[in-house]
Image (cartoon, rainbow, N blue to C red):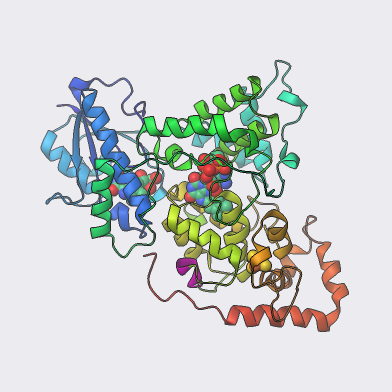
Amino acid sequence: GPVLVPILGDQLTRTLASLRGRTKEDTVIVMAEMYDEATYVKHHKQKIVLIFSAMRHFAEELRDAGWEVDYVELTDEDNSHSFTGEVARAIERHDPAAVHVVEAGEWRLNQAIAEWPDKFDREVTILPDDRYLCPIADFREWAEDRDHLTMEHFYREMRKRTGLLMQKSGKPTGGEWNYDKQNRRPPKDDMDPPERPKFEPDEITQACIELVEEKFADHFGSLETFAWPVTRDEAEKAADAFFTERIEKFGPYQDAMVHGEDDLFHSMLSTSLNLGLLDPMELCERAEQAYRDEKAPLNSVEGFIRQILGWREYIRGFYWYNMPHLQEANALNAQRSLPDFYWTGDTDMRCVADCIRSTRDNAHAHHIQRLMVLGNFALLAGINPREVQDWYLVVYADAYEWVELPNVSAMILYADGGKLATKPYAASGNYINKMSDYCKKCVYSPSKKTGEGACPFNPLYWYFMDRHRDRLKSNHRIGRIYANWDQMGEERQKEYLDSAEAFLDSLEPATKDYAR
Ligand code: FAD
Ligand code: DLZ
Ligand code: SF4
């Protein structure tokens, strides 16, 4: 019999390890749209449309190239709606001699795949997913004898290993490893970011939109503005636009936020990268080329490469190194329920409301919004990690557990107790005011510290610092902050804590089961 090659919804790469070296004559590819995957959390509608449409386009592309693709649609009558179930049914249909599968991006699915050799009376080969630049085993080796898994150290190793932005002498291009100091510019009035290309839904995408409106009507998010690339060609166009129009200013304005400006100079390529429509090394090489061609400054190019070669790879390694316990981690013992406004956007905090609007309309928010507005709030308010994890996994079109979980649990919530971040990313309203135009028209004032009209981030910041003093006081990057706190005196401290508690008491917990 042939070799059966099951391909998951985020494995849409022609050079996938399980397809390399195979011939069209001896291979049957199986793909399936499944309720198990579409509802293990109730993903944003745009995310499901994106994945289904990209899967259907990929299947069509493979067929056009002569491959046999057995594609199971969501509404197919006998669909078992689980990955193992669909592979079992495909084995019955095709009687393959062997099954070749690439490991999944999520621990949950890999546990299921690990049972296949026992379950199926066939030879099963589970291949590493080599679309990433750092094999999981290499990360493990790097991590094993370290207390702190400092991203910057990992990143430098990756620069040396790949030769990206390296001089022949072994020194980094430009002499520095990292130009982050030049990448913290607040927004300017005349920045004028160009619009990113929007991809009109074609017939296939339109059919997916109708399917999702019908079958996932109660899921979060709007479908009206769907404009994601759904094929490799479209993703390449999106990348072209980034490298010609936005990379120059990507670096300096990386941390800037502007009300109603959802993309600024970001690449908006994460959805395509994570689906497998774009290759991370190719993107890094294009960025380096833009520097050599003098089309973009080094701080922008290095910043972009650090996100992909550094952060993205590090996050993935961190995930596999810390699973499954990362899911349960709650070092700060945060127990509050997620406020309803994360789903409705109904809050007077103008920064939060804008980030949630973008999240609902685009299934996207940029990094600093996810980190310093939505994430910072969840950290300061002590929202329990499981609910925050579910929220991030639901709402972002680029969210898969391997990338969402470390960012949420370890990066924003400090739930891993500080293995990833050396200190919690806690910040008061001052930070948001500096890096955005949100505060000018907010009903709250960032300069007001407590009481009526005070920016809620201000009292929440001290409430957080006070609550976790025992843990944080010995941290050399934070410890001295407590001198300021002590100087305020008990009465002032009480005003902060009372303000924070009054605000927290006013929050409505999410009533409807939006996530699961
Ligand atoms: P750009 O700003 O253009 O950056 C370029 C690329 O770098 C991104 O496409 C992405 O692939 C990579 N990158 C940058 N930062 C990170 C990071 N911290 N982790 C992994 N990759 C990174 N990214 C996801 O892809 N999926 C997620 O589920 C996800 N969840 C996040 C949750 C939180 C709480 C935070 C703080 C960040 C999260 N990120 C996630 C990282 C980052 O916010 C997005 O990758 C980015 O906003 C995507 O937009 P972009 O393509 O325009 O990114
Ligand atoms: C996220 C997702 C969704 C919504 N739907 C499907 C699906 O119907 N079929 C499929 O093969 N994959 C889907 N996925 C992606 C898988 O959940 C993904 O492979 C894991 O999240 C691992 O990264
Ligand atoms: Fe956000 Fe506070 Fe600024 Fe309002 S004042 S936009 S709540 S940071």
Q: Is residue 101 left or right of residue 79?
A: right
158 or 146, which lies in front? 158
Q: Is residue 241 left or right of residue 218?
A: right
- Quadrant of the image where one finds ligand 1: top right
State whether residue 336 is above or below residue 371. below
Identify the image quadrant of the C terminus: bottom left
Q: Residue at x 27, y 29 (%)?
A: 61
Does the magenta-highlighted stretch encompass residue 342?
Answer: yes
Residue 111 image offset from top left, x and y in percent = 36, 48
Does the magenta-highlighted stretch encompass residue 493?
Answer: no
- The boundaries of the magenta stretch are 338-344
Q: Quadrant of residue 213?
A: bottom left
Q: Residue furthest front?
A: 190
144 or 158, which lies in front? 158
**Residue 329 visible in the current orientation:** no
How many dots with numbers? 0
Q: Quadrant of residue 183?
A: top right
Q: Residue furthest top?
A: 168
Q: Residue at x 32, y 58 (%)?
A: 39
Q: Residue at x 49, y 56 (%)?
A: 358
Identify the image quadrant of the N terminus: top left
**Residue 509 visible in the current orientation:** yes
State whether residue 373 is above or below residue 419. below
